[in-house]
Amino acid sequence: MSESAEWLAAHQGEFLRRVGHVWECGDDDCGCEQAVVIAYYRNKVVPRARVPVGEWAGEFRTDHEPGADEDLVAHRHALRESDPDLEASIEWQGGIDYGIESA
């Protein structure tokens, strides 16, 4: 088992929530963005902390390249078709219109 897998096994507790959003680096010069879906788990070792586990990531974009919002929308649409229960379990965050009615 790898060191990171051992750490995860020791720390990852019960599932808390799943979030879909566009991650931004926060640097105005490079403007990096990536659409992501992250699952958060309770941390068994440090109770106040959470363990984030990346479940899906869209294309990494830099230099203020557009498209991260569209990646997230496309992923949500694909999940709506292939796994509607998973799609409904994700807290979709962001200020964009996803163009999907609530289930």
Image: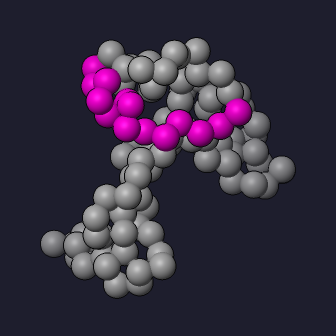
What's the colour scheme?
A: one colour
Q: Which of the image's four quarters has the C terminus?
A: top left
Query: Along the horizontal axis of the image, is 19 left or right of 64?
Result: left
Query: Along the horizontal axis of the image, is 98 left or right of 83?
Result: right
Residue at 44% over, 69% down = 50
Residue 86 x/y as whole percent = 32, 34
Residue at 65% over, 21% down = 97
Residue at 65% over, 37% down = 94
Residue 74 seen: no
* Towards the viewer: 32 or 22: 22
Per the rendered image, the range of residues in magenta is 82-95
Question: What residue occupies the far right of the structure in this picture?
Answer: 29
* Towards the viewer: 77 or 60: 77
Residue 53 x/y as whole percent = 38, 57
Residue at 78% over, 55% down = 27
Residue 86 on the magenta segment: yes
Residue 3 x/y as whole percent = 27, 77
Q: Is residue 54 above or below residue 88?
A: below
Residue 91 seen: yes
Residue 100 x/y as whole percent = 52, 16
The quadrant holding residue 12 is: bottom left
